[in-house]
Image (tube, grey):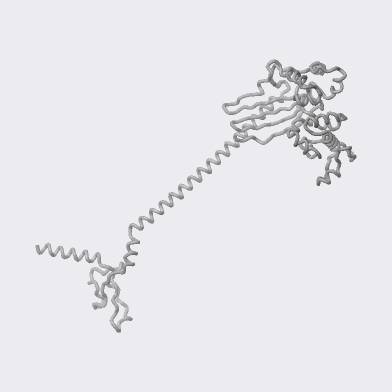
Amino acid sequence: MALLRTVQRHLDRGLDLDRTPRPHRAPAPAGRRNETPDRAVLDPRGFPRPDRPAGASARGDASTTTLPLPATVNALDSISGPGTRRGSALMIVIWGLALLAATVVGLVVYFDTSLDEERARNAAFRTRLLAESGLAIALNPQVEPHDPVLRQEMGPDARFEASIRSEGGRLNLNTLAASTDRALFLDLFAAWGLTLQESSALADAIQDWVDTDETRRLDGAERDAYERLGFTGMPRNRPFTSIEEARAVIGMDLLAERKPDWADYFTLHSSGQVDVNEASAELLRIVTGAGELEIERIIERRLGPDQEEGTEDDFVFESLDQVRSMLGMAEDAFERIAGRLSVDDPARRIESTGQVGAYRKKIVVIARREGGTLLSWQEPPIEKP
């Protein structure tokens, strides 16, 4: 029993030593306040060295005693413990993972965008190649408008389609402006909603634009009229170089309000006469002065038995006598309008469209039937999804 009590006493002393707070030096007795306390009794952690009694100085006096630590010091010790260090490390890991995730997401978005751009460039390139393929086929003088080679599938999502039309289906603006057929101008503009005075003023302004003198027509417009509106160097006093140029003529803004698609009825590359085999019913009615019933007979005859345009059974008028007979007009009446008409124009309008998925590319070319001389080349912007 004595041995057990001795072991228990030593264990109690060891536990007390582990829980011993850091010693604090008691106030020095009077007369010794300036003496430097001996710190040899403490280890680097501030605890008493095990080989020296707690509270004993190196000189062997009892000038130091152990006091309890303040509550704030114990609190700081608890804050800087192992749990706090583990929490800080966890926060660093979390922030690192967040940064890594943001980097990965950014890279994914970047590469996905790059792939989309590459796919778009590839589709645009392929649509242009397809459009050019259709154009090359349509320019062959042996290919007819109804030929199936003009429409081909080049894969599950790729195709091209080309059309061949006579440019004589439109009015030649330069030819009309230089002619003496003023009545056709007036009939055309009147059919599009302009009054007689408005039609006369616009017809004169167009002719003043293309003539080479500075003499103003009765209702026309020369340089002074354009300068009053703030435009210099107008009219050009030469033929139009594009249909878009005609928009600058005084009075064309009024026509654009009444007939927004007026430009689709004009060209600069036809022979100057309206091709009966190509012109729309509206234009044929204006040019011939015939009634709707007669014009309907012309259109039905052109479409052939299947009544579809661009098919093999389409009928082609080969002479103006056939046209006169179909219109039911007397010879003398027909002679007054015969100079406006033709049954074959040397210029062809070829439109070729290549398509890859939702991407579409169109090329519009006007060329001579004989020799394939290019008169015009237009490329509208590619159509994207």
Q: Is residue 114 above or below residue 368?
A: below
**Front residue of this view, candidates 100 and 185:** 185
Question: Is residue 179 something one can see in this rendering?
Answer: yes
Residue 339 spot, x, y in % from top left: 85, 24
**Front residue of this view, candidates 60 and 2:** 2
The C terminus sits in image quarter: top right
Q: Is residue 143 above or below residue 47?
A: above
- The quarter holding residue 133 reads top right
The N terminus sits in image quarter: bottom left
- The quarter holding residue 378 reads top right
Extreme-left residue of the structure: 1
Residue drawn at point x = 85 percent, y = 43 percent: 225
Residue 308 spot, x, y in % from top left: 68, 20
- The quarter holding residue 262 reads top right
In the picture, measured across the screen, residue 178 lies left or right of residue 10, that is: right
**Front residue of this view, candidates 326 and 26:** 326
Residue 70 spot, x, y in % from top left: 31, 69
Residue drawn at point x = 53 percent, y = 43 percent: 110
What number of labels is visible? 0
Residue 362 spot, x, y in % from top left: 67, 31
Question: Is residue 206 something one can see in this rendering?
Answer: no
Residue drawn at point x = 71 percent, y = 31 percent: 364
Extreme-bottom residue of the structure: 31
Residue drawn at point x = 37 percent, y = 55 percent: 87
Q: Is residue 312 above or below residue 139?
A: above
